[in-house]
Amino acid sequence: MNALSPHRSGLLRRARTAAGRLWPEGTAVSAADASPDHPVATGNQASGGDHHASGSAGQSAAAAVIASRRGATLSKARSGRAAASTSPFAHRAGALHAEDVSLVALAQRYGTPLYIYSRQAITEAFADFTRALRGTPHLLCYAVKANGTLAILQLLARLGAGFDIVSVGELERVLRAGGDAQRIVFSGVGKRDDELARALAAGIRCFNVESEAELQRLSALAVAADTPAAVAIRINPRVPVRTHPHITTGHAGAKFGVELTQAEALCRRAATLPGIRLTGVACHIGSQLTELEAFTAAAEMLVQLADRLARHAVPLEHVDFGGGFGIRYGSESPPAIADFIGRARAALGGRRLEMLLEPGRAIVGAAGILLTRVEYVKRSGHRRVLIVDAGMTELIRPPLYDAWHEVREVTPHSGVPAENCDVAGPVCESADFLARDRRLAAQPRDLLAVMTTGAYGAVMSSNYNARPRAAEVLVDGTRATLIRRRETIAELMAHEALLPE
Ligand SMILES: Cc1ncc(COP(=O)(O)O)c(C=O)c1O
């Protein structure tokens, strides 16, 4: 359990002071809330991860505010960082296990490459959020894009999750997995007519609208269907975020959301449009956030907007603070979930507004690994290169985001000296590396585990080079369930046709 940091006691003090205004009851962060215990794989090397300065950031007025806050709060915030607890992936009796199942046994049974998830880790990560949200009216909408495998969605639906979707395909997945339409929010900049119509018919909770054109289109569809659409306007708060440029969304020039300067007018317009019921405002400033400052600035901007709207007789029901809560891939030290939520709660103060969140990575990221086998070992220049049977087709994060994932030997060698190695996939692309410059002693036919790949792993896989998608397994204690079987070569060609004679 973490000792209560100066930062945390500050939060407590503020929450207590505000207690009289809270809705419906006090929401002080308790000492128990201060002890997040979701499993996080510990890194073994310094990490670049996704943690790069954003090239396009820094132009908005918010930048200066955030920069000054960064300096002021860094030392305080650090003491409230997410604590790594026991990982569900640990070495036992000479082999890496997922919970109580040996990865060697899983490779024998299901082959490689193979995605393996821990049910316990997903459950605990979800509980981390619900503990921190205790006493706050909320809806926790898991971002399906992080991992949309049906059994994972089913598990989360049973835990009481709502869902954040970005396509009709994700909507059908959630419904098939037993998710409740009334707990679904629909984000995304390019919703087609058929997608909007299907979501309306399904009776989703809210459309997170990203442009005036989308709002007009939804209004027309809602009137035609005689079904009112609940809407939140997604704002681009233009806050600079320190994460990889490819996963920042709330900066100037981003395609996401509505400019803050136009947001109030659009919200007021939405409130008068036929078929539209304006219920909230939303934002999502980026993924893999490892600091509180930008999140806090965006949260405060959203709540100020809600206040301005209320003054113009446009009262809202909820504020959606998005997702993006960072996790530990290597040496990052993201804030605890309770600290992010504490900031959102502080921004809301005692207002009668429900808090919506859209976490993806923080729920499933540390709960998954990619198991791969070394096919060949070769030398290239001074490098020892391990050629493995998983590549960018299974895990595109390293080439796409320069992401760093820990690589562990499943059955470590004793007596074989480790060397600096690159871990390369079999795909015919120079970028097809899973890891570079790692101390490994692995030999041909050995198994490697690429850690912390539960989010944006399997879901981003492709069939490039005519490679069937990998199988996926969910481990629960001593039990392993195949939740997605390996694709076959025949399935890869199933939707194609040869030319007629
Ligand atoms: C609108 C929206 N919400 C939520 C998320 C989930 O982000 P994360 O997985 O980092 O929590 C994303 C990710 O890009 C997003 O675009």
Image: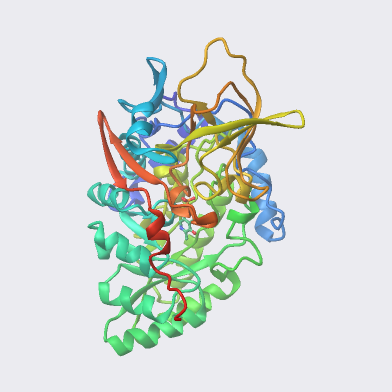
Q: Is residue 302 visible?
A: yes
Specify the quadrant that holds the C terminus: bottom left
Specify the quadrant that holds the N terminus: top left
Which residue corresponds to the image point at 34% horizontal and 38% vertical from the top-left? Answer: 110
Rendering coords of residue 249 (x, y %): 58, 60
Rendering coords of residue 369 (x, y %): 44, 37
Rendering coords of residue 48 (x, y %): 65, 38
438 shown above or below 484? above
189 shown above or below 376? below
- Between 11 and 432, the one lying in front of the other is 432
Q: How is the image coloured?
A: rainbow
Which residue corresponds to the image point at 44% horizontal and 49% vertical from the top-left? Answer: 458
Which residue corresponds to the image point at 42% horizontal and 65% vertical from the top-left? Answer: 166
Which residue corresponds to the image point at 45% horizontal and 32% vertical from the top-left? Answer: 40
- Between 288 and 466, the one lying in front of the other is 466
Q: Residue furthest front?
A: 501
Q: Residue 35 falls in which quadrant of the image?
A: top left
Q: Is residue 243 visible?
A: no
Q: Residue furthest right?
A: 381
- Between 206 and 46, the one lying in front of the other is 46
Q: Is 151 displayed left or right of 304 in the figure?
A: left
Rendering coords of residue 21 (x, y %): 35, 51
Q: How many marks?
A: 0
457 shown above or below 224? above
29 shown above or below 198? above
Q: Residue 165 falls in which quadrant of the image?
A: bottom left
